[in-house]
Image (cartoon, rainbow, N blue to C red):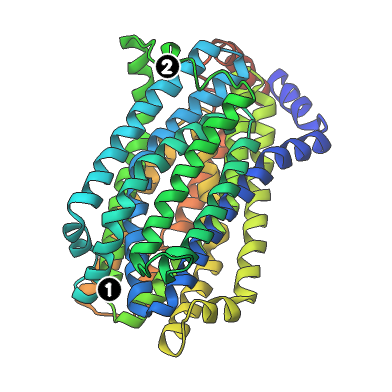
Amino acid sequence: MRERALKNDVAAAPFPWGPFLKKLAAVAIPVALQNLLTTTASMVDTMMVAPLGELSVGALGLCAQFSSLLFSGYWGFVGGGMLFFSQYWGAGDEEGLERSYGMTWVCMMTVATVFGCLAIFAPEMVMRVYTDKQTIRDIGVQYLHIVGFAYIMQVFSMAMSSLLRSTERVRIPMAASIASVGTNLFLNWVFIYGHLGSPAMGIRGAALATTCAAAVNLLAIYGMARLTKYPYLFRVRGHFRWTRAHLREYFLKCFPIICNEVLIGVGNMLINVTLGRQPEEVIAAIAVFRTLEGLIIGFFAGFSNAASILVGTCVGAGELDTAYERAKRLIYLCSGFILLVGLGVLALHRPILTGMSLSGTSFTAGVRLLSIYVAVSVIRMGNWIQNDTYRASGDAVTGTVLEIVFMYAMVLPCVLVSGFVLELPYWAIFLCCYIDEPIRYVLMQRHFYSGRWIRPVTDQGKAALDGFRARRGWRG
């Protein structure tokens, strides 16, 4: 009876919608705008390369898939790092914040160096993995050989941005993105077609513009952080004040996330290898779709980051009831937002796809891919936001296990069999990429309402855990 009364008291407490929405907007909107700017630049890159032909568009899209694999390689450390950043920020633990940033930075830069070297010194090997079309490979090699220099700068910028976002300094990364995107667009115009005395470099010009924009982004973040006297990026000694116990705790929490991102990245690479064996018109349509997918994900990532921060800081500060109530509302709010964005992109598909030089077969393929994606995006992003929320709260295992198991037991077998054995149409292969999402959503919802995903790493959070579970009537 006492447990039931405590549970009813918690449920009856009014939720402070006003402050919650203001805080959500303050974090989510700048991050969403930053991501949208970056994705819009990618879209414009595709549009500016489009006059060079569908082969160039297809090559650019496949190079973007290698960049996505890089993303998967370092994003596990970003996810693990933000778990610590947000909770230490909520607890006011500056030493823990600096230490976890240092570990995250070292791990991310190691991954960036490996991928940068592959792109610069072995671009032919990379392109051979993604397609069997020699003409597309030759174009992609020219792009990768230059853009590999951008990878290290991009990952360094992401490490700094992750710390800034987690400590609610979201305007600095957004302002840096504006400067970077502006640089990229201008230099694309200069280098691709040879304006202002520059030689016309074609696809190599797009790569050079991207590299210069990455340098501008890095310098802008560093400079603005210095000017605003943001302390945590520059206390270098604190970044390397590790002990064996600190490393053990960090990697125990990060390891599931790293496994998740790397294994899912490899799985996505195999999916892209399958799709990369389709006709050239379909490859061009897939390249354009991936750019539009980035637009949707870019918008969504702002709300996902906000969820991680708003929930993680409460867990770190020991405000576990607030963390739970925030998470419950964020899951459904984010799904609603992503549906609106997806429908908006679908409504504007004709001018967008034709603007990227898709026509005939490639245009039809682009419409089909986009329609399938919008139909599954609400459930897909619902799974994503729940996984990010779990991670920020200390549970890095549940979402990881579900995603990896379903990827390798269900999605990949269906994609590979449909592509290489049954030789089904591209849209059927693409549909197989999402067949696990509804099942995982049900399992993720069950785990959410159990409350077992709240696993603090700070002393304040751990001290509040038993009381939180007692108030909810949960055990274990």
Position of 79 relative to 363 (above/below): above
Question: Which of these two is toward me, 27 or 188?
Answer: 188
The N terminus, quarter of image: top right
Mark 1 and mark 2: span between their CA atoms? 48 Å
Mark 2 lies on a secondary structure that is helix
Can I make out residue 160 in this image?
A: yes
Question: Which of these two is toward me, 129 or 275?
Answer: 129
Residue 260 lies left or right of residue 41; in this view the side is left
Q: Earlier in the sequence, mark 1 or mark 2?
A: 2
Q: Which residue is label 1 attached to? A: 418
Please state the horizontal and vertical placement of residue 370, each as a whole percent of the image. Answer: 51, 72
Question: Which of these two is toward me, 365 or 415?
Answer: 365
Residue 273 lies left or right of residue 389; in this view the side is left
Kindly identify the residue that appears in the image at 29 percent across and 60 percent down. Answer: 412
The amino acid marked with disc number 2 is His
Kindly identify the residue that appears in the image at 53 percent across and 19 percent down. Answer: 232
